[in-house]
Each structure stands twice: as C-alpha cells, then as structure tokens.
Image (tube, grey):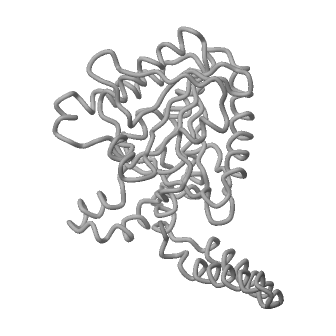
Amino acid sequence: MILEVEKPLLELEEKIAELKKVTENGVDLSGVVRQLERKAEELKHSIYSNLSAWDRVQIARHDQRPKTLDYIRELFTQFHELHGDRHYADDAAVVAGLARFEGRAVLVVGHQKGKDTKENLHRNFGMPAPEGFRKAQRLFTMAQRFKLPIITFVDTSGAYPGIEAEERGQYEAIASSIALMTELTVPIVTIVIGEGGSGGALGIAVGDRVLMLEHSVYSVISPEGCATILWRDASKAEQAAATLGLTSENLSKLGLVDEVIHEPLGGAHRDLAMTYKAVQLALTRHLGELVELAPDDLVEKRYQKYRAMGRVQREVKVSP
C-alpha cells in the first residue's frame, strides 16, 4: 500500500537503493548517496510533521500496520485463544484469549483485520458481528470471575452493518457490551492501534485508561460514512476527516484519550520493534497503576471518567 503523501519520499528512497547497487558494483557514488539520504531524512520530517487528518486515516489503514495478533505475538506469552459466544457462532473479526503480560495473567481482546484480501474476507475486514461482541462479553465476565486485568486493542472501521447482523441484534450486543464494561471490577486498558470507528470500537473500548497510537484515528463514524450522510457523496471523505476531529492530538486535547503513544517517523509499520516497545512500556505503566486500586475505586473512577466526557462550559453574559 502506497500512501499519496509518501510518494515523493518513496521515489527518493528507490533512487538511493539503485545508487547503492551501482556502488556495490565498483562505481563509487557514496558521496551522492549520503547527500540523497540527508535529503530523504529532511523530506521525511517535513512530510510527517505536516500530516492532514485524511493522511492520518490512510496511515491508520495501512495494510502493513501491526494488528492485534501481531501485538499479542510480540508482547504476550502463553496466549490461548478462546472462541465462540455460546449463542450463535465464533466471530473471526474479534480475537480473544488468556495470556500473560510480563508474567501477569490477563485477558486480551481485540479487533483483527487481515493483511491481504483472503484474510480480510475471513476476518470480515475487522468489522464485528453481534457474536463478536457477545464473545467479548462472555470473556469479560470470565475475567472478572478470576480477577484478571483486561487489555483491549481497537482497530475497526465500525461494526458490521449487514442485514443479518441487525437481525441478530447488532446494536443490542454493542450496548450490552458497553454497559457490562462500565461495571467490571477489574482493570481495563484500551489501546487504539489503527481505526476506532463508532460503536464497533466502543463495544470493547470502555477502559479505565484509553491509549492511542499517534497515527491512529478514533471517531463516531468513518469519514466515508460521514461524507455520505452530510453530502451524499463518499468522495468527500477527505473533507469529512478534517471536520470529525479524529486525530490523536485533537482527542487528547479534549480529554477523550489518556495518552498518545508516539510512533516511529513514518508510522508504526516503518519500525515494528520500536512500536512494540512503546506500546509495551505504556501498558506496563498504566496497568501497574490500575492493579493497585481497589475494585470499588476502579468502578467509581471509570464512572466519573465517562460521566465527565462531553461536558461543555459556556460563558454566560449578563445584561446590565
């Protein structure tokens, strides 16, 4: 996947690679290579320090961006995936299971997109059906029973909007999942690793701490969906993205996320090791703080956290 904003940089990097091959064959172009590498570094900083909201959406959707199972593989041990909602079926768009994080037993739940067409079809492009949320609810309840902290990874454009999902109670499943998470007496840390779209994200994202990767996006609707509703034209998605305020910076200023995890220059996919380490450190810090709180304190603080969202202060002018 090539992002429009990256094209000048990628062209320059390809030219550098070609010149390095010529140098390896006996023609010394090392001086030219160093000069172009400096230019590439300057261009990289220029590009990624001036990203638009739509650019962020594209980076968040990059097919090589690490997914939930990648984080599970790199950051957790003894992961044992659990399947099914015990009502209808197993939903491959939501992966969940028991694992250990730095030796501590935890429950991990997350949306899972694919990295190619075949896997995306199997995972329904990371869009959960009702059974995905009901699987999560079943395991949230189990985590509470065994006093296990919960870690959730958010990466979905939204819940699956198909007729069959509606027939099986899509929005009831989402609402029930949100309601359940507000009452759990175990710590919950949520990380938005890609897209956080509407109720599909919120269904597993009611965390005591909500973290967000720098180039992830989080909003009430996808830019395409917003453009279709407002202007009846999905091609205006770029304009919608700028209006939605879906970037990590905006959400942090509004107090909707607790920490923005910085990504490598160019996005998480450009330096996976650095990305995993940054997420690990953030998880360690927040989970360590939350496990020290009493269950009643966790629930009360969580209630107050979400109760305060959306509060608007207005200046009232009194007439003389």
Front-most of 120 and 226?
120
- 182 left or right of 174 in image: right
Name the residue furthest top: 145
70 in relation to 151, above or below: below
Q: How many marks?
A: 0
Q: Residue furthest front?
A: 25
Q: 75 or 161, which is in the foreground?
A: 75
Q: Is residue 35 above or below residue 14?
A: below
Left or right of 247 on screen, residue 237: left
Q: Is residue 151 visible?
A: yes
Residue 44 placement (x, y as % from top left): 66, 75
Name the residue at 60% across, 26% down: 301
Residue 317 visible, this angle? no
Vertical placement of residue 13 versus 162, above or below: below
Picture coordinates of residue 73, whole percent (x, y):
61, 36
- Picture quadrant where residue 21 is located: bottom right
Residue 276: image location, x then y, percent = 68, 45
Q: Is residue 317 left or right of residue 239?
A: right
Identify which residue is drawn at 48% across, 57% down: 63
Residue located 36% across and 65% down the image: 240
Q: Quadrant of residue 127?
A: top left
Task: From the top left corner, tell me how far across and down residue 186 is, in percent.
Answer: 59, 18
Q: Quadrant of residue 164?
A: top left
